Image (cartoon, grey):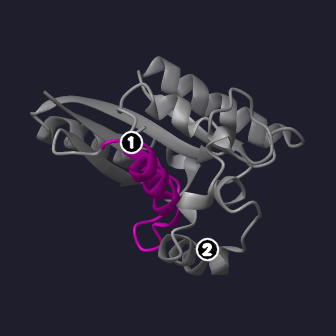
Amino acid sequence: MGKQIILCVETNKQADTDSTYIMDAIRHNYVIDNSVKISKIYMKTKTRYNDKGVVRDIDKLINMYNHGKSYVVYCIDTDQIESNQMYKMEFDNISDYCKNNDCELIWFCHDVEEVFIGKKVKDSEKRKTAAEFRKKECVKKLNFNDMRSNKQLKGKSNLLLVMDKYLDRKI
């Protein structure tokens, strides 16, 4: 029986930056064979996590997949939740939504670039930076302990903790 992992990412389809990092980490750490399908939903922004169009796209992918179970995983940046009450409330709302709708939540503190390359990146540089990350195979140099965090601390993520529930490790 197969499984489908539906990654809901903040980026848009043209840029596709966040999923570049996420997919590199998944491919590096997990066995992805014919029994695993990874699909993406481009939310454009995390505030669209419960948008009717996003939910419709998720439902469409689930209904089209008849080889096993589908798992919905939201992938979001925490931004500055420790110092900005609005970001904290937004994060809590998304977290509650995931819990109430049987979805997983992968977070990146403060953003995906900070976790994967150790610094913030200007919006205008994100596509170029993600492409270089993939081209130079930077995933091989990462400290994956930073992606096994239970706490939203700078440069940390829970990516591997979540994916460990659904995918088999290579090592």
Instruction: Give the alpha-carbon distance from disc 2 to disc 1, as whole Å.
Output: 25 Å
Relative vertical location of residue 66 with respect to residue 51 in this rendering, above or below: above
Q: Nearer the viewer, residue 129 or 25?
A: 25
Mark 1: secondary structure: loop
**Rendering coords of residue 33 (x, y %):** 21, 45
> Which image quarter holds the C terminus?
top left
Q: Which residue is mark 2?
A: 126
**Rendering coords of residue 142 (x, y %):** 63, 54
Does the rendering let one see residue 123? yes
Query: Magenta segment range?
Result: 7-31
Does the rendering let one see residue 11? no
Q: Which residue is mark 1?
A: 30
Q: Nearer the viewer, residue 27 or 93?
A: 27
Left or right of residue 29: residue 130:
right
Residue 69 falls inside the magenta stretch: no
Question: Which residue occupies the extreme right position in the image?
Answer: 83
Question: Which residue occupies the extreme top position in the image?
Answer: 100
Under mark 1, the amino acid is: Tyr
Do tag 2 and tag 1 residues touch (Cβ < 8 Å)? no
Q: Earlier in the sequence, mark 2 or mark 1?
A: 1
**Rendering coords of residue 149 (x, y %):** 68, 32
Return the mark for residue 85: none
Identify which residue is drawn at 79% across, 38% down. Answer: 153
Residue 28 falls inside the magenta stretch: yes
**Rendering coords of residue 124 (x, y %):** 65, 80
